[in-house]
């Protein structure tokens, strides 16, 4: 049977104890399977209108009740996948949903592959590829801003922005093609410089959109902020202060933290993966050496570094050596333990790094650190128009290619070559094809497999 036309089922909710669990069915046999599996009070699901809710029991082949459920019926094409969809709202936890799913598989459905519901929504034209990708971004979002970005993309913001580059490119190609199609007739006059301006505009739009990839990465994957410094500087104390609970062990013994410790948090609405690391110092202990190696790895892949220094000890040669390897733009020096200073907090106007003074044992200064980090994040994200899409790496590659193609087409139109319009057309078509690959107007199975394999089962 064509895999697009069979009926699939999966548990859509996360495993574990919860109020309810949802099992979803999609496909032409969804209502028939529901008819067999449900014993309700009214007519069979297949006789019920779309977008209605029903109460009943999922029952075994012999009529034994397996769970009490609410059933939602959404007939295609007005459903997420575009096909007939039936959702069973079971009791939460592992067993009720598993028993319900098992029964639906006995009644003619097969287990859904990861992302298969969303894949069907795309193949049935309910959403484009950027919207399908946004579903995954939304599920994975760790902060307000990432969720907002995903939701905008889900509502078609990226497709609309792309269309603003695609439309003028298509119009330009149409003008050129009209002049090429009827060479024996009087050539259709056109304004070459206007076409060149339009193409340069398309190229610039694609380039600008591609440049939002860094913001997109930070919003999707989170901003990696690494807390580093010499042993005992108070790194784990700062980590605990920022995450709001005693996640990492703190002790007066130098070398307490060895493994890196990660925790998600949201700062200024941005998703942050905060990472505590082992103190950086030379040590004869193999385990501590491994800890330092891991700290150095984290520094390399970090977006921002909170470099903690005990203000009573000041900046040492070891600190200088570590800091030298990091660009000042992504470092914030945290002068810690200022409660122990006899004099006022030290000022280091000659240091290239921004800094903040704090005491991790006196929670009142935590706000200053958080607001300084928030400023740094906002600055490092760079200016972005409110509501503008922020693209992924997959989109960036295609947008860069489209930008180059439109720019080459414009250059050709400016050249005296006889075949310039023909070649320019080929480049425009190439650019448009790249834009179509972003939205999925053009796709192959490999691309879909790559995108949807990242999804969970049930989405
Ligand atoms: N007085 C004072 N003590 C602090 C402050 N911050 C941390 N400490 C103390 O300093 C000691 C070391 O703190 P940690 O947070 O474990 O330091 P660390 O940098 O993570 O140490 P390692 O994991 O061993 O590298 C602990 O006894 C903390 O209570 C502070 O602001 N003021
Ligand atoms: Mg520590």
Image (cartoon, helix red, strand yellow):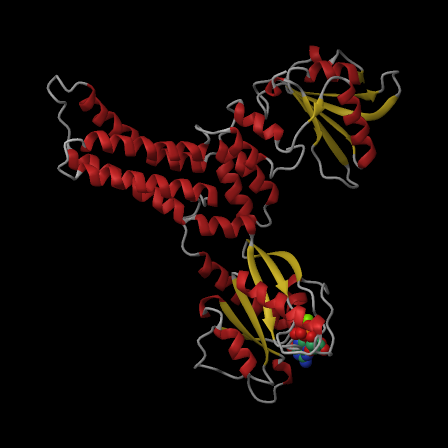
- For the N terminus, the image quarter is top right
29 vs 284, nearest the viewer: 284
Q: Is residue 407 above or below residue 81?
A: below
Residue drawn at point x = 65 percent, y = 37 percent: 456
For residue 98, what is the image quadrant?
top right
385 vs 412, nearest the viewer: 412
- As drawn, the residue found furthest toward the left would be 186
423 with respect to 89 (left or right):
left
Residue drawn at point x = 82 percent, y = 28 percent: 99
Q: Position of residue 247 (x, y in %)?
A: 72, 63
Ligand 2 shows up in the quarter that is bottom right
- For the C terminus, the image quarter is top right
For residue 106, what is the image quadrant?
top right
Q: Is residue 119 above or below residue 414?
A: above
Q: Position of residue 261 (x, y in %)?
A: 67, 62
Q: Position of residue 110 (x, y in %)?
A: 71, 23
30 with respect to 407 (left or right):
right
């Amino acid at each position: 049977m064509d895999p697009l036309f069979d009926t699939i089922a999966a548990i859509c909710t996360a495993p574990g104890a919860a109020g309810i669990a949802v099992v979803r069915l999609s496909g032409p046999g969804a209502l028939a399977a529901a008819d067999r599996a449900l014993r309700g009070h009214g007519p069979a699901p297949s006789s019920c209108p779309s977008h209605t809710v029903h109460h009943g029991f999922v029952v075994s082949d012999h009529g034994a009740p397996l769970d009490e459920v609410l059933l939602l019926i959404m007939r295609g094409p007005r459903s997420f996948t575009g096909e007939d969809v039936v959702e069973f709202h079971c009791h939460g936890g592992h067993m009720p949903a598993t028993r319900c799913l098992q029964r639906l598989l006995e009644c003619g459905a097969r287990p859904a592959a990861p992302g298969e519901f969303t894949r069907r929504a795309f193949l049935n034209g309910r959403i484009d590829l950027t919207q399908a990708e946004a579903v995954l971004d939304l599920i994975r979002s760790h902060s307000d801003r990432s969720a907002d970005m995903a939701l905008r993309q889900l509502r078609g913001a990226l497709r609309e922005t792309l269309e603003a580059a695609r439309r003028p490119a298509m119009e330009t190609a149409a003008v050129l093609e009209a002049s090429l199609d009827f060479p024996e007739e009087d050539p259709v006059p056109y304004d070459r410089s206007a076409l060149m301006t339009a193409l340069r505009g398309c190229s610039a739009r694609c380039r600008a959109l591609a440049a939002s990839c860094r913001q997109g990465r930070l919003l999707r994957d989170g901003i990696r902020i690494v807390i580093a410094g010499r042993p005992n500087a108070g790194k784990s104390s700062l980590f605990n202060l920022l995450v709001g609970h005693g996640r990492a062990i703190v002790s007066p013994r130098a070398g307490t933290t060895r493994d890196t410790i990660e925790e998600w948090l949201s700062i200024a609405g941005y998703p942050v993966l905060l990472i505590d690391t082992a103190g950086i110092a030379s040590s004869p202990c193999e385990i501590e050496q491994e800890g330092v190696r891991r700290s150095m790895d984290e520094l390399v892949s970090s977006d921002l570094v909170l470099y903690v220094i005990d203000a009573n000890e000041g900046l040492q040669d070891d600190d200088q050596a570590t800091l030298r390897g990091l660009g000042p733009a992504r470092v914030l020096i945290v002068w810690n333990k200022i409660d122990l200073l006899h004099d006022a907090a030290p000022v280091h106007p000659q240091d290239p790094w921004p800094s903040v003074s704090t005491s991790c044992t006196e929670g009142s200064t935590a706000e200053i650190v958080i607001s300084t980090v928030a400023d740094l994040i906002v600055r490092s994200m760079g200016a972005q128009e409110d509501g503008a899409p922020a693209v992924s790496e997959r989109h960036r590659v295609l947008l860069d290619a489209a930008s180059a193609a439109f720019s080459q087409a414009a250059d050709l139109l400016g050249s005296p070559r006889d075949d310039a319009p023909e070649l320019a057309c080929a480049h425009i078509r190439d650019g448009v094809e790249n834009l179509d690959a972003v939205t999925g107007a053009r796709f192959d199975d490999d691309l879909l497999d790559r995108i949807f394999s990242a999804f969970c089962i049930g989405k």
